[in-house]
Amino acid sequence: MAVLTHEAIVSELDSGRLRIEPLKDDQVGAASVDLTLGDEIRVIAQEVTPIDLWEDADFRNYTQVLDLAEPFILQPGVTIHGITRERITLPDDLCGFLEGRSRFARLGLMIHVTSAFVQPGVSNRQVLEMSNVSSRPLRIHAGVRLCQLVLMRTEGRGVYTGRYAVQEGLR
């Protein structure tokens, strides 16, 4: 697998094989595409009862969706879900990784705890597992370019059809 650079990303976008909507030209960097936080977040309910982690565990049973019309204060040690404003559509021979941007990581914002992989063949918005690992609260705003998508060519072809193949929002 090889990481796509600016020229290859633009070529894939121009051909229509790769679609990122909406997208401004200045979001495409040297070897990644900046993505913005959408207008809603999902917050884990603060309870002391443990959550059992079985195969059928569903995060929706323990969380609530909040509108991000006003900034959200992310407290230290807390994890929330965000979702990208952009819809990512990958062909069956491209995959990607979501990465935090260093300017925010240096302030303690982690964008993905464990599931940063974007499967080939997806066409959805990407959920961001956002955690505050700093000692200070962080104010989260909709529309900010919080992460970047690094794209790679696959060896072979595949299309993801799993549990999260369709992600249009956090509801």
Image (cartoon, rainbow, N blue to C red):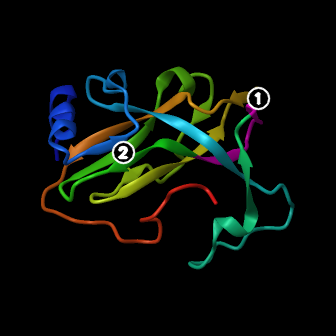
Query: Can you give x and y, in whole percent of width and height, for residue 127 in the image?
Result: 52, 51
Query: Can you give x and y, in whole percent of width and height, for residue 89 in the image?
Result: 32, 51
Name the residue rendered at 79%, 67% in the picture.
Answer: 50
Q: Nearer the viewer, residue 159 or 57?
A: 159
**Quadrant of the rendering where the C terminus is positioned:** bottom right
Query: Can you give x and y, in whole percent of width and height, for residue 150 in the image?
Result: 32, 38
Q: What is the spatial separation of the Cα atoms under label 2 and label 1, in whole angstroms?
A: 27 Å
> Which badge, 2 or 1, is on the more N-terminal residue?
2
Name the residue rendered at 37%, 33% in the picture.
Answer: 23
- The numbered dot on residue 165 is none
**Residue 61 placement, left or right of 142:** right
The reply to whether dot 2 and dot 1 touch (C-beta < 8 Å) is: no
Q: Residue 63 falls in which quadrant of the image?
A: bottom right
* Classed neighbour count for the residue bearing mark 2: other residues with Cα under 10 Å, few (<14), some (14–19), many (≥20): some
The kind of residue tagged 1 is: Pro
Q: Element at badge 2?
A: strand
Q: Element at badge 1?
A: loop
Q: Which residues are magenta?
A: 70-82
* Classed neighbour count for the residue bearing mark 1: other residues with Cα under 10 Å, few (<14), some (14–19), many (≥20): some
Number of numbered markers: 2
Query: Can you give x and y, in whole percent of width and height, for residue 66 in the image?
Result: 74, 48
**Residue annotated with mark 2:** 97
Residue 71 in magenta?
Answer: yes
The kind of residue tagged 2 is: Phe
**Residue 78 placement, left or right of 147:** right
Residue furthest right as drawn: 48
- The numbered dot on residue 137 is 1
Depicted 138 relative to depicted 84: above or below? above
Depicted 171 relative to depicted 5: above or below? below
Residue 15 in magenta?
Answer: no
